[in-house]
Amino acid sequence: MAREFEIRREVELPASPEQVWAAVATGAGQASWLFPTGEGEPHGVGEVWAGHTVTAFDPPHHIAVQAQGPDGTVFNALEYIIEARDGGTAVLRYVHSGVFTDDWDNQYDAAGQHTDFYLHSLAQYLRYFDGRPVTYVAAEGPDASKAPGAFGVLRRALGLTGDGTADDQVGLALPRLVLPGLDPLDGVVDYVTPNFLGVRTSDGLYRFYGRNAFGMPVGLAHHLFAAAVDREKTELAWRTWLDGRYA
């Protein structure tokens, strides 16, 4: 049964409104912390961009978009309100609303936890990588990674033990990880919850998703800011690494 949802967040970001706007209202910006949603950028109300119709457009302060079903029902809507603050920072008020059709509680929980992780990644991008060209790579684990405890397998493979909290793991340097054909991965933990893990390196944001908690395979999605990243080669290496964890 279809049921409406709404997720609201407010975050302070280490950037000007113009920088935040470029991150949330352009295709290149969104690929740097969220995922690729579309190319280019919108230019006004009524334009269709990234599969959504623009319903509010006031750069660099306010953009809203929505997608409708055949019956006119708004099944997905996103709104970003950006306000300048002292010291070159900005506050972002974010609203995600729409309709979930199945397993409402699980979908709402998953969307809320993903939102928190994405907005944290936005802040990390703006602080460390703002404006740098990005290569987005993603991979999903096999069906075996849907099992309870599967995300713990991935955490241990990265060098994290136990169920430590953010207080004692954020800032922790991970053991060097070597994937065949790729440069060694040296990074620090920048985000950790039972279902999500973020690792920041000198040239990337590495994101790991314990979606087994929501009935899906464990996955990963990385935002890489090094020059000349071979996306297909990198995705294959990470997909092979994931498969090996759950063989």
Image: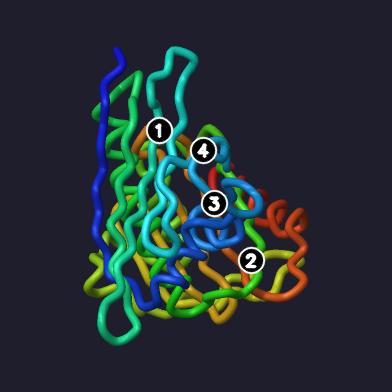
Residue ID for mark 2: 134
Pointer 2 local density, CA inside 10 Å: few below 14, some 14–19, many at least 20? many
Q: Tag 4 or tag 1, which sits nearer the N-term?
A: 4
- The scheme the figure's colours follow is rainbow
Residue at x 32% of width, y 78% of height: 89
Task: Please provide percent x and percent y for residue 8.
Answer: 24, 48
Image quadrant occupied by the N terminus: top left
* Distance between the alpha carbons at the discs numbered 2 and 3: 11 Å
Q: Residue furthest bottom?
A: 87
Viewed as shown, does residue 19 lie left or right of 224? Answer: left
Q: Tag 1 or tag 2, which sits nearer the N-term?
A: 1
Q: Tag 2 or tag 4, which sits nearer the N-term?
A: 4
* Distance between the alpha carbons at the discs numbered 1 and 4: 16 Å
Q: Is 180 located above or below residue 48 in the figure?
A: below
- 14 vs 221, nearest the viewer: 14
Mark 2 lies on a secondary structure that is loop
Which mark is nearer the camera, 4 or 2?
4
Q: Please, what is the three-letter code of the amino acid marked with disc 1?
A: Asn
Mark 3 lies on a secondary structure that is loop
- Quarter-wise, where is residue 127 in the image? bottom left
Which mark is nearer the camera, 1 or 3?
1
Q: Please, what is the three-letter code of the amino acid marked with disc 3?
A: Phe
Task: Please provide percent x and percent y for residue 132.
Answer: 61, 75
Residue ID for mark 4: 46
